[in-house]
Amino acid sequence: MRRLALVITLLAANLGTGYAQKAGRTVQPKGVVVAFFDQQRLQYGPGPATLEDFKFFFKLIQEIANRDFPDIQLKTLGRGELLLLPDGTRLNVETLRPELGFVLAARGKKRKVLTGVQSDMDFACAAAAFFGGHSSACPE
């Protein structure tokens, strides 16, 4: 009888401590910026040079996004990938009309598509206007 009482007590103590732990909070980003490109459609004509320009400016844009918009997620999306945006819509590079660009999306707002190669200043000004922030790379 003592053993049964001891086992029940130990089980109750273990169950109690298991439920006492708090779940870790995950911080939801304020929005998302998706850099997209369709490499297959960019293979011909001025496409390869355009893709190289896009990749060059993407490095600068990545620095601006990390510095000036820390609560915004920056993702890249290529052909064949599908992404659920915070506004509830899905993004598929194969069905987008521009071959490359950026999509700015936030919950409760209509997404904004920046088509083509964007300079760091163009991106900074568009992101500041869309997300309601300020960027040192935007002169306004």
Image (cartoon, rainbow, N blue to C red):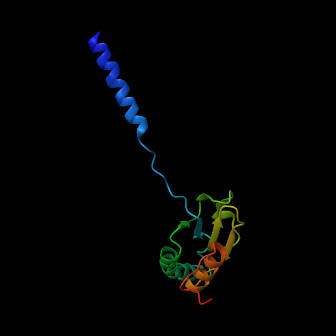
Residue 81 locus on image (x, y percent): 58, 59
The extreme top residue here reads 1
Residue 72 locus on image (x, y percent): 55, 68
Determine the residue positioned at 55% across, 78% down: 51
Depth check, front residue: 99 or 135: 135
Determine the residue positioned at 47% across, 78% down: 63
The quadrant of the image that shows the C terminus is: bottom right
The extreme bottom residue here reads 139
Q: How many marks?
A: 0
Write down the quadrant of residue 93 in the picture. bottom right
Depth check, front residue: 107 or 11: 11
**Vertical relation: 17 (above or below) 75:** above
The extreme left residue here reads 3
**Vertical relation: 4 (above or below) 29:** above
**Vertical relation: 79 (above or below) 126:** above
Is 108 left, or right, of 120 in this rendering? Answer: right
Q: Is residue 7 something one can see in this rendering?
A: yes
The quadrant of the image that shows the N terminus is: top left
Determine the residue positioned at 35% across, 19% down: 8
Q: Is residue 46 something one can see in this rendering?
A: no
Determine the residue positioned at 66% across, 74% down: 130
Residue 98 locus on image (x, y percent): 68, 73
Residue 134 locus on image (x, y percent): 58, 80
Write down the quadrant of residue 106 in the picture. bottom right
